Amino acid sequence: EPEVTQTPSHQVTQMGQEVILRCVPISNHLYFYWYRQILGQKVEFLVSFYNNEISEKSEIFDDQFSVERPDGSNFTLKIRSTKLEDSAMYFCASSEALQPQHFGDGTRLSIL
Amino acid sequence: GEDVEQSLFLSVREGDSSVINCTYTDSSSTYLYWYKQEPGAGLQLLTYIFSNMDMKQDQRLTVLLNKKDKHLSLRIADTQTGDSAIYFCAESSDRGSTLGRLYFGRGTQLTVWP
């Protein structure tokens, strides 16, 4: 069964550095999403992306964050000037129509 | 904002049925989901139900939706030790400003005892 793949599985970064989290959505899917889960908290929506542009973003997704689909297969989340509170599990998801969304295994981001 | 609530823990004996409950507040919810997360893994889509349905069955899984009470449940028949995981309830609506966004509960840790 096709699946969403995310790399790396774990990223450790110094505070203030930039990170890029990578995702390969399922190949025929058109809608792409990023969510995050801070330890002990709910999974939170960050952003959705369709037709090469952001279709919706949450209040969390400020100027520190950006997304890109640099080619026909990858979908990336860039976090600039990382802060300690950016430490979380970041999940990528994709869907063929708006629903249902299929998730990857996540990238655990640790900011030191 | 939209709120999704679940109890945090459930323990059952192998072979028994498990029922995981969820409540939500968004009356315009269109889809309701159950995702499973095993240790170290991602969110696996188990099943989902459209809001105009009140029941969906898929092998050992039965989803019941009471739209009036905004209550969703997941019943796992003949629960096995391999069903031990965290189960997340999630909802979405097709309302304009939150198109496609999922709102998650905190997850219910299901422990199955042999």
Image: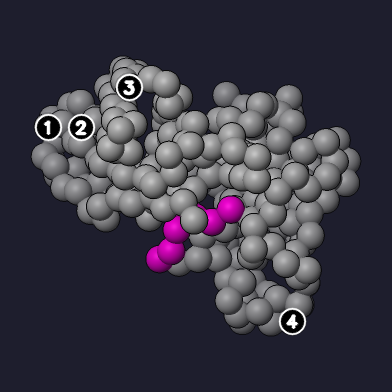
Dot 1 falls on which chain?
B
Disc 4 residue type? Gly
**Which residue is the site of mark 3?**
B54
Element type at marker 4? loop
Q: To which quarter of the image does residue B48 belong?
A: top left
Crowding at dot 3, Cα within 10 Å, few <14 / some 14-19 / many 20+, comes out as few
Q: Nearer the viewer, residue A51 or B28?
A: B28
Element type at marker 3? loop
Dot 3 falls on which chain?
B
User: In 3D space, how far apart are the residues under numbered discs 2 and 3 (Cα atoms)?
Assistant: 23 Å
B48 sits left or right of B73 in the view: right
User: In 3D space, how far apart are the residues under numbered discs 4 and 3 (Cα atoms)?
Assistant: 49 Å
Q: Residue at x 49, y 56 (%)?
A: B1
Q: Give the residues drawn in magenta, as a range.
A: A40-45
**Which residue is the site of mark 2?**
B79
Q: To which quarter of the image does residue A111 belong?
A: bottom right
Label disc, if present, on residue A16 of the rendered structure: 4
Mark 2–mark 1 contact, CB under 8 Å? yes
